[in-house]
């Protein structure tokens, strides 16, 4: 064993002021020092090397539900905190087989059909958000573009009525507070209010679409249920529609925010994108690799075994650093260089295996459109002098605000 390169896994997260600014120096030190780092207080393993991270997320024998994790592990605490009746338990994020496939497969099929049929409409929504932002002066790119894009897109996919979109946006922004363990009491109250409103709204919408189908994902899912092609309850449907909301909003917001910040701080890359908006496609992959919105994901060992070269025990939790893997020198040439024309060799920003991000195709549609349009619409966009405020949400990476001048 080598000397402990870090104090705890939290010193790699946005809770730590230094890691919040830039987690990579510590991640790189950890990756070089050891293949599998054990945090005895948090009771989790942390892997940082690309091949180990990829093998872990792709390993379908691993478990996901926090109740499988050993006593005292921070992964387990999620389950201990769960109200046994809370709907979150039925989200695909934490489901194991056979329930995970039962719920995810029909949902994914309906979701992918819908986004491919609606891709022009979704791009029009992105364009409308960009067109509605201020034409001149200074504005907050997060508030005016990065936050509304994913919320308005998912609202359209799900079938939220036009006159409820602003309510839906307020509820969605409230439930996203559930990701923040440091939220204040007032924020917790707001989050609970948003969750209750969304529950009622989805319950009513599911019933309404069962009676009168429309051209939206909820109608698609209700039709699959009706034909017996989707074996899931209304409660599971409701929770997983919310999982699309919660999983997709902040992450896509951060992909847009992090990408704009990266491009504005790398003028040569920005100039290349302005000359050739088709570079938006590889640029999105490079932003995901270089500064991805989600820092970690995790799995739980189903038995004692040697994993990542280390003897590990049944029920131990294995966290994988997507950030560290995406900058691994063994995988990428010059990994700390942001290069939108990099020959694409893949990344793990969306995880992998059976739990791979279900929203990846949608996030890509939205972000590609933003990066193809934004700097054509605002060729003079530049950063305003500001202290950057990276969010304190542990294991996510995104900006609170990003002030730009156009
Ligand atoms: C840039 C944007 C996004 C990033 C970086 C991201 C990242 C991730 C990651 C790392 C996971 C865990 C995968 C694993 O453990 O292997 C995940 C899962 C998930 N994501 Fe995303 N995501 C993004 C956008 C979205 C969108 C747009 C949606 C929905 C509309 C979404 C919904 C979900 C859901 C429901 C899961 C759980 C899937 C499962 O466990 O089966 N995400 N995402």
Image (spheres, rainbow, N blue to C red):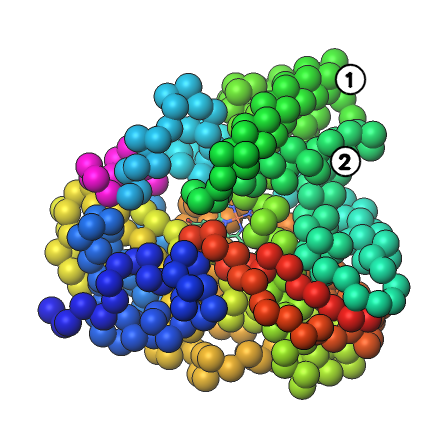
Quarter of the picture containing the C terminus is: bottom right
- Element type at marker 1? loop
At 76% from the left and 22% from the top, the residue drawn is 213
Foreground residue among 52 and 163: 163
Report whether 254 appears left or right of 2.
Answer: right
- Magenta span: 61-73
In the rendering, which numbered label is found on residue 34? none
Residue 335 against residue 169 in the figure, above or below: below
Dot 2 crowding, Cα within 10 Å, few <14, some 14–19, many 20+:
some
Residue 216 against residue 252 in the figure, above or below: above
At 25% from the left and 39% from the top, the residue drawn is 69
Task: Look at the image and say whether residue 276 sits in the magenta stretch.
Answer: no
- How many tags in the picture? 2
Q: Position of residue 302 (x, y in %)?
A: 22, 41
Does the residue tagged 1 have its C-beta within 8 Å of any atom of ligand 1? no
Report whether 271 appears left or right of 262.
Answer: right
Decide if residue 279 is in sight here.
Answer: no
Foreground residue among 59 and 190: 190
Decide if residue 95 is in sight here.
Answer: yes
**Residue at the spot of label 1:** 212
Corner quadrant of residue 146: bottom right
SS majority, magenta: loop
Q: Position of residue 100 (x, y in %)?
A: 42, 34
Q: Position of residue 306 (x, y in %)?
A: 15, 56
Foreground mark, 1 or 2, reads: 2
Dot 1 crowding, Cα within 10 Å, few <14, some 14–19, many 20+:
few
At 63% from the left and 78% from the top, the residue drawn is 265
Residue 150 against residue 345 in the figure, above or below: above
Task: Look at the image and say whether residue 68 sits in the magenta stretch.
Answer: yes
- Element type at marker 2? helix
Foreground residue among 309 and 197: 197
**Residue at the spot of label 2:** 166
């Amino acid at each position: 064993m080598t000397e402990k390169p870090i104090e705890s896994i939290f010193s790699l997260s946005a809770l730590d002021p230094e890691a919040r600014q830039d987690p990579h120096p510590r991640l790189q030190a950890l990756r070089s020092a050891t293949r599998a780092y054990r945090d005895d207080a948090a009771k989790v393993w942390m892997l940082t090397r690309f091949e180990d991270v990829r093998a872990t997320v792709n390993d379908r024998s691993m478990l996901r539900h926090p109740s499988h994790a050993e006593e005292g592990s921070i992964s387990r605490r999620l389950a201990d905190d769960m109200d046994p009746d809370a709907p979150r338990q039925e989200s695909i994020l934490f489901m194991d087989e056979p329930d995970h496939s039962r719920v995810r497969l029909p949902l994914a099929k309906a979701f992918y059909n819908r986004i491919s049929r609606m891709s022009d409409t979704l791009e029009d929504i992105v364009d409308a958000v960009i067109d509605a932002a201020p034409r001149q002066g200074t504005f907050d790119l997060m508030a005016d573009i990065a936050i509304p894009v994913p919320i308005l897109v998912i609202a359209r996919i799900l079938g939220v009525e036009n006159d409820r979109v602003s309510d839906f946006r307020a509820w969605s922004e409230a439930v996203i507070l559930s990701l923040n363990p440091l939220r204040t009491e007032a924020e917790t109250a707001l989050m609970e209010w948003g969750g209750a409103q969304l529950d009622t709204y989805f319950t009513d919408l599911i019933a309404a679409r069962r009676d009168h189908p429309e051209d939206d994902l909820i109608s698609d899912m209700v039709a699959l249920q009706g034909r017996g092609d989707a074996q899931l309850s209304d409660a599971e449907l409701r929770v997983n529609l919310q999982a699309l909301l919660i999983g997709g909003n902040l992450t896509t917001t951060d992909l847009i925010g992090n990408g704009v910040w990266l491009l504005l701080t790398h003028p040569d890359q920005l100039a290349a994108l302005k000359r050739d908006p088709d570079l938006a496609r590889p640029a999105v992959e490079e932003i995901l690799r270089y500064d991805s919105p989600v820092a970690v994901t995790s799995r739980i060992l189903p038995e004692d075994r040697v994993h990542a070269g280390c003897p590990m025990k049944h029920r131990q939790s294995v966290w994988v650093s997507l950030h560290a893997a995406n900058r691994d020198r063994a995988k990428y040439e010059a990994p700390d260089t942001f290069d939108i024309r990099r020959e694409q060799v893949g990344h793990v920003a969306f995880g992998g295996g059976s739990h791979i991000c279900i929203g990846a195709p949608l996030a890509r549609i939205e972000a590609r459109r933003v990066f193809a349009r934004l700097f054509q619409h605002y060729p003079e966009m530049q950063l305003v002098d500001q202290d950057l405020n990276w969010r304190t949400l542990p294991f996510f990476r995104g900006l609170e605000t990003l002030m730009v001048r156009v």
